[in-house]
Image: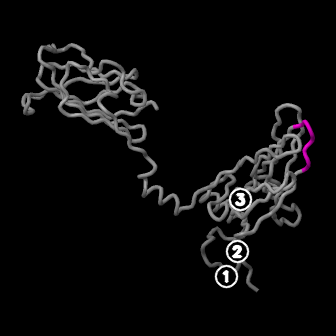
Amino acid sequence: MANFVNTTLMDGYAGGPHITEKQSGLANQAIIGEADYVLEGGQNAKAQVLTNNSIRIFDAVYSIQGRRDVIAANDYTDVTITNGSQGMNRNDIIVRRYRKNSLSEIESTEYAVIKGTPSTGTATDPSVTEGDIRTGAVLHEMKLYRVRIEGLNIVSVDQLFTVLPSMATINKDLVDTSDKIAVKSYKQADMHLQSFYNVSAFSAYKVGREVHFNVSLDPKSGTTLLANKLYAITSAAIATDLRPAVLTHIQCVGCGQSWENTCAVMAYVDTNGMIYFSTPATRAFYKFHGIWIAAN
């Protein structure tokens, strides 16, 4: 009879069974993560209150520190909640409990309810056992739900676990971001441009927290701008949600009507929402282009 030895090559033929639960658990941790998760699919361990003494937990695929634990599609388990007491508040915690028999080394999982301590005031959560399966813990409890009980009644069931999205969902989110990042456009009124400028081109929009601003200005007749002086193009702070997280320098050029005689112009937007510029030489037009990260 062949004597099969443990091998580190999980995905290779070794002449017979050779993959251990430790290897599988560690590999799952590396792929899924080291914490406790419900993996996306089916009913994701949905909870339904049946009575003040019973809550139904529907099908799920758990990853408990890398140990995959599968409740088949359309299966469910009803867990029992101990009666509340009139005038008392209590928090119970429903857990998915992992156990390992220290003698046989057989591992198993089950639902359990950790009963909280009744209180006339604000109820607090009971403690659960959090072991490290990787290092040989024989007991670990994954928190699923907090059951809030006021008097005799269950008043809420709060989800405590994270549903980890599937690779298909992650890929879809990466490819299709059109509904994830809102694009918001703004009017000239939102920028409070000084009344003594003519505005010949304007756009302002925000993608997430990234602000894009473009404007072409020329001073109205009778307005004199001097070289090497600091001027504001805004008469008041720009819209609150456009103001930058930090003072940001933006691009600006001064030029003639046909882009002749261009010169670089210093310009910036400060955290208070004012936009300033200073030109080394006076020009007929000033064209601003800026991108900055808004504080909100």
**How many other residues sit within 10 Å of disc 1, few (<14), some (14-19) or many (≥20)?**
few
Question: Picture quarter containing residue 110?
Answer: bottom right
Q: Are marks 2 and 1 in contact (CB under 8 Å)?
A: yes
Residue 203 percent location from the top left of the image: 27, 36
Task: Name the secondary structure under disc 3.
Answer: loop
Give me the disc on residue 181.
Answer: none
Which residue is the site of mark 2?
18
The mark found on residue 45 in the picture is 3
Colour logic: one colour
Residue 136 percent location from the top left of the image: 78, 56
Q: Nearer the viewer, residue 192 or 256?
A: 192
The residue that appears at 72% across and 66% down in the rendered structure is 70
Question: For the magenta stretch, what is the residue range?
Answer: 82-88
Q: Earlier in the sequence, mark 3 or mark 2?
A: 2
Residue 202 found in image quarter: top left
> Which SS class for mark 1?
loop
Along the line of sight, which residue is nearer the eye, 196 or 72?
196
Q: Is residue 234 magenta?
A: no
Q: How many marks?
A: 3
Residue that label 1 marks: 15
Say what amino acid the circle numbered 2 marks: His
Q: Do labels 1 and 3 touch, CB within 8 Å?
A: no
Which three-letter amino acid code belongs to the residue tagged 1? Answer: Gly
Which one is nearer the viewer's eye here, 244 or 86?
86
- Residue 39, percent from left and from top: 64, 60
Spatial separation of the CA atoms under disc 1 and disc 3: 39 Å
- The residue located at (21%, 28%) in the rendering is 252
Q: Amino acid at mark 3?
A: Ala
Observer-side mark, 1 or 3, equals: 3
Dot 2: element: loop
Residue 126 visible in rendering? no
